[in-house]
Image (cartoon, rainbow, N blue to C red):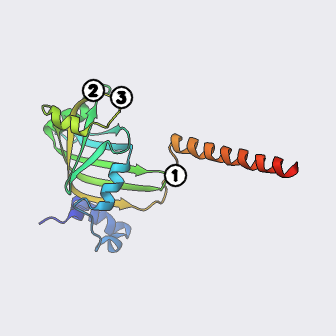
Amino acid sequence: MTKAIDIAFTPAVKEAQSRKGSRAAYAESEFGSTIDPNLRAFIESRTSLYLATASADGQPYIQHRGGPAGFAKVIDEKTIAFADFRGNKQFISLGNLSENPKAYLFLMDYANRQRIKIWGSAKVVEDDPELVASLFPDGYRAKAEQAILFTVSAWDANCPQHIPQMFPAPDVAQAIAERDARIKELEEQVTALSA
């Protein structure tokens, strides 16, 4: 039985780790193979993810997918699903998945400097309007063309080294508004005390 870590740490990767001196540090490592509550919370709080696919001959492709927090939903301990919104109509991911189901999700949390990598397989579901409707975020202004179902084989969380800390514009705007309100409140107190 293949261990989850062996999906990423192939013999060639292990050889490179040995040659570069990091193999001992990773020899006893384990990757997750099911979605636990912490991973579920992380996935469902994202407004953005990257879906990597490859053609039958291995040509890689990465596509951004986004929506409101919760657009990617955990269906069970092995399955992540999201409505696939209309985009540029190139359909490279869909074409790739029709001939090669292997896929990869890359999720970032820049504010907390955390990233999650998820290996697995994906399929496109084009003929299930009920599924697509169940995955569609309430009130989101987009058109869903199909659903993507991603089956988790392995996942890992990386260290925060080299991740720049960035914050979503709405969070920054809220923090500035709260600061400005507090400044106004303090200015009013200073004026009252001065009088």
Counting residues from the start of the chain, the first of labels 2 and 3 encountered is: 2
**On the image, numbered disc 3 is attached to which residue?**
141
Counting residues from the start of the chain, the first of labels 2 and 1 encountered is: 2
Residue 53 place in picture, x, y as percent = 24, 42
**On the image, numbered disc 1 is attached to which residue?**
164
**Residue at 23% in and 46% down:** 103
Other residues around mark 3 within 10 Å, as few (<14) / some (14–19) / many (≥20): few
**On the image, numbered disc 2 is attached to which residue?**
90
Q: Is mark 2 on a helix, strand or loop?
A: loop
**Residue at 74% in and 50% down:** 186
Disc 3 marks a residue whose amino acid type is Arg
Q: Quadrant of residue 83?
A: top left
Kindly check if marks 3 and 1 are in contact, taking CB atoms under 8 A apart as contact. Answer: no
Disc 2 marks a residue whose amino acid type is Gln
Query: Which mark's residue is nearer the viewer, 2 or 3?
Result: 3
Residue 35 place in picture, x, y as percent = 25, 59
Q: Distance between the residues labelled 3 and 1?
A: 30 Å
Residue 193 in the image: above or below residue 124: below
Q: Is mark 1 on a helix, strand or loop?
A: loop
**Residue at 40% in and 50% down:** 108
| Left or right: 131, with 69 as reference point | left
Q: How far apart are marks 2 and 1 (CA)?
A: 31 Å
Q: Which of 97 and 56 is in front in this view?
A: 97
